[in-house]
Amino acid sequence: MNKPVYIAAFSQSKFGKLMGMTVPQILSNAVTEVCQQIAVEPSVIDMGAVGSACNFTLNKQGLLSGLVATVPGMAGKPIESVENACASGGQAVLSVIYKLLSGVGDVGVAVGYEKMRDNDGKIDGKLIGEVLGYYSHPDERTGKVFIFPHLFAEIMQCYLQVYGVSESDLVQIAVNEYQNARFNPYAQMNKVQITLDQAMKIEGINRYVVEGLPLKTYDCSQITDGYAALILATEEGLNKLGVAKADCVEIAGYAQATDPLQKEGRNTLVPAGAHKAMRRAYEMAGVVPTEVNVAEIHDCFTVAAAIGTEVIGKASPGKGARYWVEGKAAVDGDCAINMSGGLIAKGHPVGATGVAMIGSCFTQLKGKASKEIQRKDAEVAATFNIGGAMCASVCTVLRNPV
């Protein structure tokens, strides 16, 4: 039996634009700010992991672990950098959990970050499209300008055709998430509201991303700067930190699975690895999907949110979008999903995403979200973080300690 692992603290930046903040500053802030949440020094941390996907290409920076070690008190400790595309943050959390379980120490920090905009806050869309395209199979890049939106536009078209779902059913997810983000002070789009009519109407910024395919601008997540961090600990670690178990959240179940990178030849509507990882996380936690009433799922595109709703067991295949349309994903619905605003409205700083998803559930389970988006009876939470075209999946189940 594995030792229990707890979240002792969570912090994140405002998602959106970090402007002139350098990568060393970002990682230093991530570590020191999460320590400040529970009034401890970084020196109490035994090990760490940092997740990022675009640090080489967009920031010209490698060996991120060495930058974490630059934080006073962190030198000489086992720290690693991890990359698993958009699941890099979730992978960093798992890396720390595995270190804790292997006896490397009792307290660890998981950090995720991405700086996707320049120092003026501007986006080089063509460059970002190319860089994110590196996380696809080489054989599936030919003829695609924006590779990832193109791949998910194909998945979206398949979802609509196979299940008889409408474009408006999917884009309703985005409308709901913008409404949630309004009450999340850390969300990139918390000053923007959209209606279903706006999200469906092809005008202004809203356009079909790939000609002949159904993916629209409002179906897409944001290009975002941001960082997030979690302090994880065993029971012995909580004693060292001076943090009461009642103030923590237990990561009761966790699993990771990776399907082949190539989209062609596998069922991306019912991704085998994702379902396997989620099932293992539930089994480890001794929880069934009906017990989950808070979730953060990876909505890089609205179709991914629909599939994610199915992966966490809240809807059968093809019924994920309908779950949202019927209000079941609302704060007072069957399960409060993506109260943070999700990647579509909160923002998607690739490496920070998986860390922030778990952190958002921590905030919900401790009753610390804004009242408009706080699930009143938050008891058990699930997260589903993916990398690639439904390729790498990191799943967790969280609960308040018994």
Image (cartoon, rainbow, N blue to C red):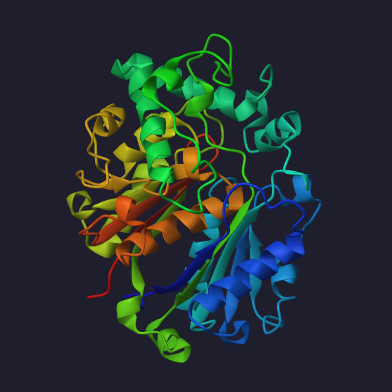
**385 vs 46: above or below:** above
Q: Quadrant of the N terminus?
A: bottom left
* Relative depth, front residue between 293 and 192: 192
**198 vs 81: above or below:** above
* Relative depth, front residue between 376 and 308: 376
Q: Is residue 396 left or right of residue 138?
A: left
**364 vs 115: above or below:** below
- Tell which residue pokes out farthest to the right in this image: 60
How many numbered dots are placed on residues in this image? 0
Report whether residue 84 is seen. Answer: no
The quarter of the displayed image where residue 319 is located: top left
Residue 399: where, in percent of width, then height? 28, 65
Residue 268: where, in percent of width, then height? 43, 30
Report whether residue 252 is seen. Answer: yes
Q: Quadrant of the C terminus?
A: bottom left
Residue 21: where, in percent of width, then height? 74, 58
The quarter of the displayed image where residue 315 is located: top left
* Relative depth, front residue between 58 and 177: 177
Residue 115: where, in percent of width, then height? 69, 50
**31 vs 105: above or below:** above
Q: Is residue 20 left or right of residue 319?
A: right
* Relative depth, front residue between 111 and 41: 41
- Tell which residue pokes out farthest to the top in this image: 212
